[in-house]
Image (spheres, rainbow, N blue to C red):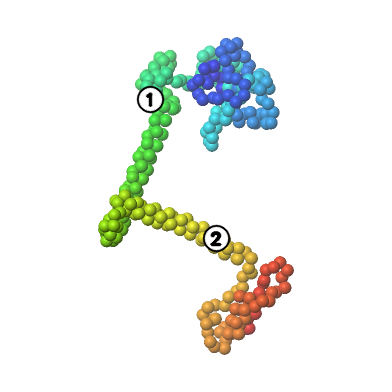
Amino acid sequence: MGVPAIFNQIRNLPISEGRWINEMDDSQKRAVIVIGDEVNRTLFPGKPALGSTVLLNGIRFQVIGVLQKVGHGDNMNLNLRSFVPFHTMQQYFRPFNVGSAPDVISFINYQPKSRAVHEAAKQEVHKIIARNHGFDPNNPDSFDEWDTVKTVDQVGKIFDAMNLFLGSVGLVTLALGAIGIINIMLVAVADRTREIGLRKAVGATNGSIMFQFFVEGAFLTLLSGGIGIARPRHRRSRSALARDCRNRCWPVPCPPRRYARTSGSTAQGITNNDVRTFKRNRYGDGRCAGRSDGRCAPTHSYAS
């Protein structure tokens, strides 16, 4: 991209190494270039880029600066770009299909002096471009532009709406919790009216009675929270133990329950003697099938 020296004041282009294009580079049409972070990693992997040359359309450009990585994810356009002085670009890289016009440009970036004059600056730019090219500046179809100030305002409104919604949800939740606590405390005080009266009769102050209720509530809260935190860990540990058992034990086919409970001599080839054999093999009788890896593989046989 061919840009003037003040371009880095309009766009956020932090320099990682070297320097940015200056006025002398632009006025003297120097063959210098500032490359993006992704271009640097592609062209000069593991090597210093400053002072190296890049061949563009048969012309050698000296690298005078490397940009820091800007954006993340899909927003990587600036990291893939390289920047040369505007007049250098105008001299060596003429745009296509524009005839002999000497002052052709592909885009304009501008920044108002302050946010308050954003709309005024936008209308002024529209009027200047429309006057130079002879069309109506009030026609919205005449401009293909990206208003970053407007985009920021829209994103800010979305976040404000989200904050308002989440804040209202939080307030409702706190209100419901407060109502529940008030009811619980009311019941607790109503059930202990005699105790409170007895304590006040022997000289207890209001502060000591309130402190007692506060300590009891805090203790119950901590105890309930501890139980709630400990139970999921206990369940996870039991699940891990069960998985370990399944990984270390050999499965033994179990006879159908409806046949194991029969008292007859046979039931589809499975007898009571086979059920006893299955239980002995399933739960162990001190014998192992001769495995050397420490795991018991019980044997089983069913009469047919």
Most extreme residue toward the bottom is 265
| Quadrant in the picture for the C terminus | bottom right
298 shown above or below 140: below
Residue 192 in view here: no
Q: Which residue sits at x=38%, y=53%?
A: 215
Crowding near pointer 2: few (<14 within 10 Å), some, many (20+)?
A: few
Q: Which residue sits at x=67%, y=71%?
A: 296
Q: Which residue sits at x=58%, y=12%?
A: 24
Q: Which residue is mark 1?
A: 140
> Disc 2 and disc 1: Cα gap in Å?
65 Å
Disc 1 marks a residue whose amino acid type is Pro
Q: Element type at marker 1? A: helix
Q: Residue 34 at x, y = what percent?
A: 60, 22
- In front: 179, or 159? 179
- In front: 112, or 175? 175
Q: Which residue is mark 2?
A: 237
Residue 248 in view here: yes
Q: Quadrant of residue 44?
A: top right
Q: Quadrant of residue 191?
A: bottom left
